[in-house]
């Protein structure tokens, strides 16, 4: 069993990774405005320039960095650069909030047991980049979102928490995804806050928060 106590003194330092508009990032920024939440976003990392997540970071006065895959001849070099950028901010937790790149072994090893991701399906069902579309195509009656720790696989890490969303007969992918996002925002904020304030332990695939 691996134990990850809460930082002393707090608040927990969060590095948030994002690739798009940054709605999950905003949910965390809003939550961190309350000192009782127990965490602060100390940096935002992206793999693209000119995206909404960077605008949200700037508006909140949070430092940001961008590490683009295309700027490196090999993926391993990108992974090493991303790891180094995150390390500069000494995070207690790294949160992938809509980060659409698969990080490599260097990053996973650096933040093992402290790297949180969200996925718009009830893992282990419908992993990968099209969880909402795949659930609809399969004819699932319920789907939802999963907050989990990242390991070396794709959406295979230990599950921390899940939220269920009903699939309606008239759902389209955008409609369903919007309802999942609403649950995802609340679930991510709840999980990150609890990890920050209480710490956690991991035994095999089981995650425990005191």
Image: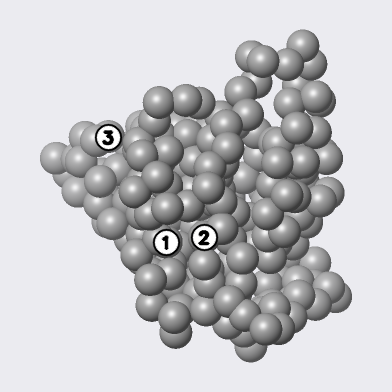
* Residue at mark 1 to residue at mark 2: CA–CA distance: 8 Å
**Secondary element at image label 2:** strand
* Residue at mark 3 to residue at mark 2: CA–CA distance: 31 Å
Dot label at residue 173 = 3
Residue 125 visible in the picture: no
Q: Which residue is mark 2?
A: 41
Quarter holding the C terminus is bottom right
Q: Where's residue 168, x and y in %?
A: 19, 48
The residue at the point 80 percent across, 24 percent down is 77
**Secondary element at image label 3:** helix
Nearer the N terminus, badge 3 or badge 1? 1
Q: Which residue is mark 1?
A: 28
Nearer the N terminus, badge 3 or badge 2? 2
Q: Are marks 1 and 2 in contact (CB under 8 Å)?
A: yes
Choose mark 1 or mark 2, whichever is in front: 2
Residue 60 falls left or right of residue 85: left
Q: Where's residue 40, x and y in %?
A: 52, 67
């Amino acid at each position: 069993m691996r134990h990850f106590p809460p930082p002393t003194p707090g608040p927990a330092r969060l590095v948030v990774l994002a690739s798009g508009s940054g709605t999950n990032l905003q949910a965390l920024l809003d939550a961190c405005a309350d000192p009782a939440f127990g965490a602060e976003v100390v940096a935002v990392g992206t793999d693209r320039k000119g995206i909404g997540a960077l605008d949200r970071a700037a508006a909140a006065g949070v430092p940001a960095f961008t590490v683009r895959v295309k700027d490196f001849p090999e993926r391993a070099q990108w992974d090493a650069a991303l790891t180094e950028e995150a390390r500069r901010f000494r995070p207690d937790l790294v949160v992938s909030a809509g980060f659409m790149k698969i990080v490599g072994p260097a990053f996973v090893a650096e933040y093992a047991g402290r790297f949180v991701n969200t996925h718009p399906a009830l893992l282990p069902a419908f992993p990968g980049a099209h969880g909402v579309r795949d659930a609809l195509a399969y004819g699932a009656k319920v789907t939802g979102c999963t907050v989990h720790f990242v390991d070396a696989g794709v959406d295979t890490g230990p599950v921390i928490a899940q939220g269920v969303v009903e699939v309606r007969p008239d759902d389209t992918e955008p409609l369903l995804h919007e309802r999942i996002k609403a649950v995802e925002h609340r679930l991510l904020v709840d999980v990150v806050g609890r990890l920050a304030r209480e710490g956690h332990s991991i035994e095999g695939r089981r995650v425990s928060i005191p």
